Amino acid sequence: MEQVKPVWRIPLADIDLGPEEEAAVLDVLRRRWLSMGETTAAFEADFAALTGAGHALAVTNCTAALHLAGMALGWGPGDEVIVPSLTFVATANAVRYTGATPIFADITGLDDFSLSAEDAARRITPRTRAIVVVHYAGYAADMPAIRALAERYGLDVVEDVAHAPGATLGGRALGTWGRIGCFSFFANKNMTTGEGGMITTDDDDVAGRLRLLRSHGMTSLTWDRHKGHAWSYDVVAPGYNYRLDEMRAAVGRVQLAKLPAANERRRALDALYRQLLPAATPELGLPYSETRGISACHLRPALLPVGASRTRFMDEMKAQGIQTSIHYPPVHTFSYYREQGRHTSLPLTETVGEREVTLPLHPGMTPGDVESVVAAVAEALDAAIVRPSVETTVTPA
Ligand SMILES: *Cc1c(COP(=O)(O)O)cnc(C)c1O
């Protein structure tokens, strides 16, 4: 089969799938056991080993992982869950699935786009149940501060680790700092199974609830056998079908094995961006100059200077065959969340929402590609900055 022809000279993200993934899928198809089998179990064991988590559960996608997290922690109508607005909408949508209300909090600053513990603290009420953090672009949020806050008020912490598989903070994997970690294996993430996700937790009770809810709320066969009811099962909650299939798990195992080297490659390319961009375009803001821990470098975000036209900038980049994107249009500004009647003001999130542009970053890029992007950025920014036209003021006689 021929690959789909690339549209972009340098795409924003790219996937690295080869003969190993093909062979792994073929092997599953030939063994004819397609769901919740030994490949999924092995993928979960590999993932638990990588993160050091007590439990890893493979799921349909990260959105399902976030939903299951909220259900396992007992969120429901009347509860409030603090979430960032500078994230993919699924972070907030998943809170809504449980009936709870997402309460948006601002980011830390223009160098650190993750949830501000200080702003989160201001939004805590007697109804608050939990805080969801997103490790934006692969960079660790300030987990010690978030955890201290959560402990003070008896809140749960859930990590949305969609951007940060393989990233660490203080030598500890992101996704294991909170009570539950939710990972994504969507096609544009650091590792992919097409659609797919993983939940991590160290809490045995939470793991048990997650396992039940992932599969219709049915008690497992193992459990049944243990109780001497191998011929039947019970349903103890109206659970979901959020399972991952064996083909995806097979791809996931190969992708996971490649992840450490792929992340290392991302960090090297990102370091090159940081080295070259300030000299080429001093006006461009480059967040995460100070980073906590080791980033998964999922994205390379940049901040356009005030007054630059982002549309013009992105059009100029497109004309050069370079794909750019925006992470993110703030969730609290979408119609649905605006209509929830909460007129939240998040000044830093809104500033980033207006000025952020994401540059291409993926392990398939060469240092030459980074140089090409940097050169294009300098030109595009020049075209995008609306400079006041030079006019001579004529004093009337
Ligand atoms: C991609 C993403 C998700 C959703 O992941 P899916 O696996 O596509 O459901 C959630 N949160 C963030 C921050 C993401 O980037």
Image (cartoon, rainbow, N blue to C red):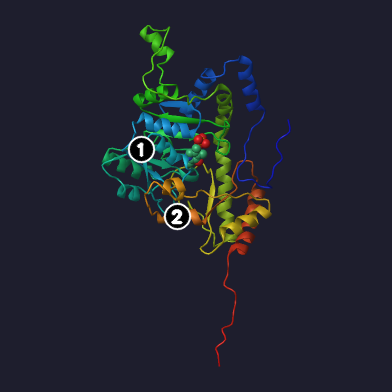
| Residue 367 % position (x, y) | 64, 48
Rendered view: 383 above or below 90: below
Q: Is residue 138 left or right of residue 223?
A: right
**Can you see residue 394?**
yes
Q: What label does residue 18 carry, if any?
A: none
Residue at point 64%, 54% (across, down): 317
**Can you see residue 166?**
no
Q: What label does residue 100 carry, if any?
A: 1
In front here: 258 or 21?
Answer: 21
Quarter of the figure with the C terminus: bottom right
Q: Is residue 118 left or right of residue 290?
A: left
Quarter of the figure with the N terminus: top right
- In the rendered structure, which amino acid carries the disc numbered 2? Glu
- In the rendered structure, which amino acid carries the disc numbered 1? Ala
Rendered view: 328 above or below 25: below
| Residue 229 % position (x, y) | 39, 7
Q: What label does residue 350 carry, if any?
A: 2
Name the front one of labels 2 and 1.
Answer: 1
Secondary structure type for disc 2: helix
Tell me which label, 2 or 1, sits earlier in the chain: 1
